[in-house]
């Protein structure tokens, strides 16, 4: 083999090695990307981030709700030409086309919504369950027979054996209202009394409350009845 042939063979071998190295590097660079979409509300002079908007992303057939920054993030998005639709109640839907490369990168996109009325194009995710209720804000209003507030009456909350275990107010003032924070139980007993009137106890059921409850107790003139014990 002459010198020229040997040189050509060496060049071809080197080129083959370089091609393999480059191919390996390219394959290693391929991966799944992260798509970050910000939804804005169109304004007169500028757009502001829109929290609580739904974004439907075709790449993952998934819908997310924007945070306080108007942002949603979709991870592990494959290469391709995808689309995202932004929508919120009171706004027109808007579509944005998004190209995701074969390399693992962060892809940023934005959607600007205008005011309008359209149905949601997305299957919206279920809202998170409400937090459990452990305490109830209970308002007790003591009234006279004519429906006016009973000024400076007494009220307490407890159960039938301990009428004031959850709290007592021995001068509820001119509004006739007393406010208590009680543990959420199946029920509590509310007692109201005043000098020269018959004290009354009423059962208040708390099992289905949303965290607040209101009860009215009417006192009639007469002999003493139910009383709020003083500890």
Image (cartoon, rainbow, N blue to C red):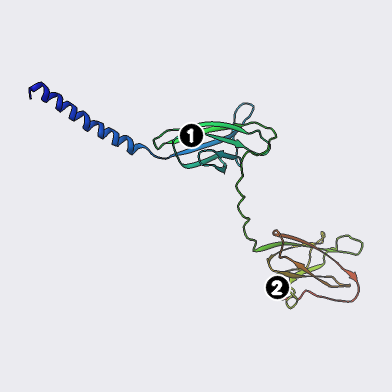
Instruction: Determine the residue positioned at 68% across, 66% down.
Output: 184
Of 157 and 117, the residue lying toward us: 117
39 sits to left or right of 193: left
The residue furthest front is 1
The residue furthest bottom is 161
Residue 51 horizontal/vertical position (percent): 60, 40
Q: Which residue is mark 2?
A: 165
Instruction: Determine the residue positioned at 48% across, 34% down.
Output: 108
Q: Can you tell which of label 2 and label 1 is closer to the viewer?
A: 1
In which quadrant is the C terminus drawn?
A: bottom right
| Residue 81 appears in the figure | yes
| Residue 67 appears in the figure | no
Residue 153 horizontal/vertical position (percent): 82, 67
Residue 177 horizontal/vertical position (percent): 79, 61
Q: Which mark is residue 108?
A: 1
Residue 86 horizontal/vertical position (percent): 59, 36
Distance in Å between CA atoms under marks 2 and 1: 58 Å
Of 214 and 38, the residue lying toward us: 38
């Amino acid at each position: 083999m002459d010198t020229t042939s040997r040189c050509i063979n060496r060049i071809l071998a080197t080129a083959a090695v370089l091609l393999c190295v480059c191919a390996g590097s390219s394959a290693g660079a391929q991966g799944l990307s992260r798509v970050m979409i910000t939804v804005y509300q169109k304004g007169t002079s500028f757009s502001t981030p829109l929290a609580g908007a739904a974004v439907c992303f075709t790449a993952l057939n998934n819908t997310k709700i924007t945070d306080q920054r108007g942002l949603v993030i979709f991870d592990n998005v494959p290469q391709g030409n995808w689309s995202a639709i932004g929508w919120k109640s009171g706004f027109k839907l808007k579509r944005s086309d998004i190209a995701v490369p074969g390399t693992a990168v962060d892809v940023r996109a934005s959607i600007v919504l205008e005011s309008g009325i359209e149905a949601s194009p997305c299957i919206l995710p279920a809202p998170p369950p409400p937090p459990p209720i452990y305490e109830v804000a209970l308002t007790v209003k003591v009234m006279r027979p004519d429906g006016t507030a009973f000024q400076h009456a007494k009220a307490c909350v407890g159960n039938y054996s301990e009428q004031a275990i959850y709290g007592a107010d021995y001068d509820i003032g001119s509004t006739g209202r007393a406010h208590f924070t009680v543990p959420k139980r199946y029920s509590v007993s509310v007692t109201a009394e005043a000098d020269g009137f018959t004290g009354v106890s009423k059962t208040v059921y708390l099992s289905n409350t949303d965290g607040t409850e209101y009860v009215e107790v009417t006192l009639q003139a007469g002999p003493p009845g139910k009383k709020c014990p003083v500890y």
